[in-house]
Image: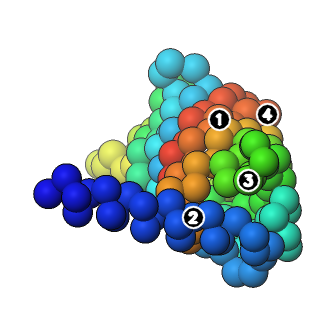
Amino acid sequence: MKKLFVIMAALLLTFGAGAQDKEMKGFQFGVNYRAEFVNMIHSQESANLSLGYRINRGNYVGLQSGYVFKGSTWIDADPGEYAYRGIPLRAEYTHYFGLGKTRRHSIYAGAEAGGMFVNYYNGFGMIFDGDAQIPASLAVNKVIPYAGIKTGLDFNIADFTHLQLGITINYIGYGVSAGFTF
């Protein structure tokens, strides 16, 4: 068993060393989980997919979309919390700063801009049916603009898979993300 483990480790190291000669470019996609906070009460959690093009080893441009499956935020000026679901759509640019001689792992920095399409309930209103008053929830659709910067670490797990851990800072708060790129 130990011999098999040593052979597999040697093969993985050999494959990794051979791939470092190539320039990384071409189509790239990734998936990530992101949690963003305005304060300890208002936050959102989302799963995202990023599709784009890696221009060279250092530059990536793409589009990012996903689904906000848990949101509670500041959407309107009215007091109170509004739970919502949403779809973010953002353009992104990322620059990778390679670490070490092989530049296998890197630190990344970038920017994102776009919007989030949300649907939420803005309290309750009353529908008048003759003399009867019937409570009704008031659904609202809205586009929330988004602009922010991001930074983090990119770990090369295999030659085609990278683990990314990062932080985001946008004009309304901050967040953390974790995901994989291929």
Q: Can residue 110 be seen in this view?
A: no
* The disc label shown at residue 102, or none: 3
Nearer to us of marks 1 and 4 is 1
Vertical arrangement, residue 164 with respect to residue 19, above or below: above
* Coordinates of residue 147 in the picture (x, y in percent): 80, 46
Q: Give SS at disc 2.
A: helix
Q: Which of 20 and 136 is in front in this view?
A: 20
Question: Could you classify mark 3 by the number of other residues whose Cα lies within 10 Å: few (under 14), some (14-19), or many (20 or more)?
Answer: few
Q: Nearer the viewer, residue 5 or 70?
A: 5
Would you name the residue on which mark 1 appears?
Answer: 167
Q: Which of marks 1 and 2 is nearer the N terminus?
A: 2
Cα separation, mark 2 vs mark 3, equals: 10 Å
The residue to which callout 2 is attached is 16
Among numbered discs 2 and 4, the one appearing first in the sequence: 2
Tell me the residue that label 4 is attached to. Answer: 171
Q: Give the mark nearest the N terminus, 4 or 3.
A: 3
Around disc 4, counting alpha carbons within 10 Å, would you say few (fewer than 14), some (14 to 19), or many (20 or more)?
A: few
Name the kind of residue labelled 4 in the image: Tyr
Secondary structure at badge 4 equals: loop
Give the spatial CA distance, label 4 vs label 3: 36 Å
The three-letter amino acid code for the residue at tag 1 is Ile
Q: Closer to the camera: disc 3 or disc 1?
A: 3
Q: Nearer the viewer, mark 1 or mark 2?
A: 2
